[in-house]
Image (cartoon, helix red, strand yellow):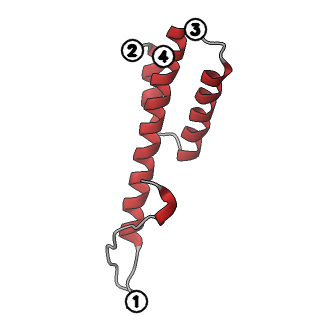
Amino acid sequence: MSQASERQGQSAAEESYDALVTRLERVVAELESGQLTLEQSIEKFAEGVRIAKDASRKLDDAERRVELLVRDADGEEEAVPFEPEAGRGS
């Protein structure tokens, strides 16, 4: 792994979900441009997969926090499983 990739991986834990999505959109745009060599495309694809995994982890963490914050009718904290909308596709 290159030093740049290692730095990106280390900073991904600190990046917001929105920043990760923005990075992923940039990678997709570069791949769709058709201007990359095969090797560059493979590297960009691998970068995109890493970013997508990091973003997915951020969403999972947020789901867990929502579960912990839900309160029941009496004001008592109650862990309630997060139920995504039917159209979310997970």
Q: Quadrant where the N terminus lies?
A: top left
Q: Pointer 4 and pointer 3: residues touching (CB < 8 Å)?
A: no
Q: Are marks 1 and 3 in contact (CB under 8 Å)?
A: no
Look at discs 4 and 1 and give the one toward the viewer: 4
User: Can residue 13 be seen here?
Assistant: no
Dot 2 or dot 1: first in sequence order is: 2
Q: Which x, y percent locates residue 74? A: 37, 91
**Do we see residue 32 in this rendering?**
yes
**SS label for mark 4:** helix
Q: Which mark is residue 73?
A: 1
11 or 36: which is nearer to us?
36
Query: How many residues crowd mark 2 within 10 Å: few (<14), some (14–19), many (20+)?
Result: few
Residue of label 2: 1
The residue to which callout 3 is attached is: 37
Q: Is residue 84 positioned above or below 45 on the image?
A: below
Q: Marks 1 and 3, how far apart in space?
A: 58 Å
Query: What residue type is disc 4 on?
Result: Ile
Image position, residue 46 (x, y; %):
45, 23
The amino acid pointed to by label 2 is Met
Residues at marks 4 and 1, CA–CA distance in whole angstroms: 52 Å
